[in-house]
């Protein structure tokens, strides 16, 4: 973790943000040698598949997924309805 003054941040904002994004570094901002804020890298995004992998859930087989899709569509009508009627 790297600490810089608020003045240094104001003068070198681009360089500080580049360091945070490229190196994943956390920067602490200080005013009068007191920590007032931190700039941290944002969490990396992941796909739905990556998120579900950690849950230990089994995936549907092709037959199961076709059955689920068919069942879910049975409840819907293709007719357009007026919600205010």
Image (tube, rainbow, N blue to C red):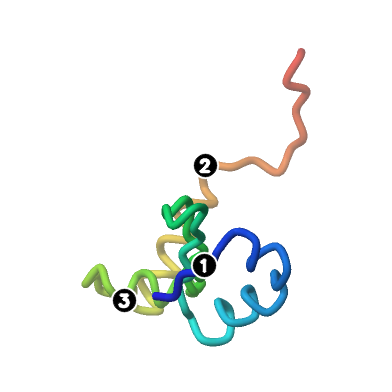
Q: Nearer the viewer, mark 2 or mark 3?
A: 3
Residue 32 percent location from the top left of the image? 49, 53
Residue placed most toward the observer, 61 or 57: 57
Residue 51, quarter of the rendered image: bottom left
Residue 8 percent location from the top left of the image? 64, 68
Residue indicated by mark 1: 42
Label 2, secondary structure: give it. Answer: loop
| Between discs 2 and 3, the one toward the N terminus | 3
Residue 26, quarter of the rendered image: bottom left
Q: In which quarter of the image is the N terminus?
A: bottom left
Residue 21 percent location from the top left of the image? 58, 79
**On screen, residue 27 above or below 31:** below
Label 3, secondary structure: give it. Answer: helix
Residue 52 percent location from the top left of the image? 35, 70
Label of residue 75 in the image: 2
Residue in the picture at 59% in, 42% down: 76
Label of residue 15 in the image: none
Residue indicated by mark 3: 53
């Amino acid at each position: 973790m790297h600490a810089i003054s608020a003045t240094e941040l104001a003068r070198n904002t681009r360089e500080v943000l580049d360091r945070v994004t490229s190196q994943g570094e956390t920067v602490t901002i200080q005013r009068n040698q007191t920590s007032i804020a931190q700039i941290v890298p944002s969490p990396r995004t992941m796909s739905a598949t990556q998120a579900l992998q950690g849950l230990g859930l089994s995936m549907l087989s092709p037959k199961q997924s076709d059955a689920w899709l068919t069942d879910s569509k049975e409840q819907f009508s293709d007719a357009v309805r007026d919600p205010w009627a």
